[in-house]
Amino acid sequence: MIGGGGELCASDRIDEILRSLGDARRRRLISYVREQGPTSRTDAARQLAAWKNDTSPATLSDEAVERAEIALHHKHLPALEDARLVEYDSRSETLLVRDLPELAERCLECCGLAERSASP
């Protein structure tokens, strides 16, 4: 729902953030871009493909990177941008994470702890 000032109401904003962070690839992508700083769409896609294939980015086929770039462009980036968790500059094809809302920070922290404790 949009309020009079064009802003999402608080409940909708919370839903949007949680929906976006409900995908482990998006959580990992946010962490990756925060660590790396501004990241090209191709590098982000290469990293997504590496995680999916449980390999290093250097060993990926061009096809695997292309599939990841399509998913990033059509699925992950729109969700992250809509939730205002990443900024994407289409001219330079660069992703950037600025200050995250406290809810997003807490979700990333809790999910990171849970994912690390579940790892063998």
Image: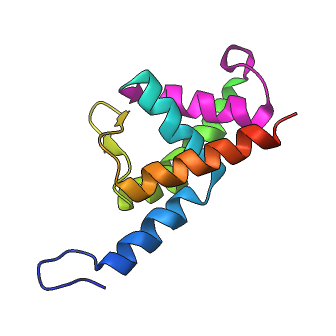
Rendering quarter of residue 63: top right
Is residue 49 positioned above or below 71 on the image? above
Q: Which residue appears at 42% of the width and 59% of the height?
A: 103
Quadrant in which residue 96 is drawn? top left
At 61% from the left and 29% from the top, the residue drawn is 47
Q: Choose between 67 and 27: the one closer to the eye.
A: 27
Coloured how?
rainbow
Q: Which of 2 and 103 lies nearest the eye of the viewer?
A: 103
Residue 59 is a magenta residue: yes
Q: Position of residue 73 (x, y in %)?
A: 48, 47
**Viewport quadrant of the C terminus:** top right
Please determine whether, in this image, residue 75 is positioned above or below residue 48.
below
Residue at 29% x, 30% y is 92
Q: Residue at x 51, y 25 (%)?
A: 43
Q: Is residue 95 magenta?
A: no
Is 116 or 51 nearer to us in this picture?
Answer: 116
Say whether residue 5 is left or right of residue 17. left
Which quadrant: the N terminus? Answer: bottom left
Quick check: 57 left or right of 72?
right
Main secondary structure type of the part rendered in magenta = helix
Please state the horizontal and vertical placement of residue 95, each as a whole percent of the image. 37, 36
Measuring from the top left, give residue 4's x and y in whole percent. Answer: 13, 85
Magenta residues (range): 38-60
Residue 49 visible somewhere in the drawing: yes
Tally the numbered discs.
0
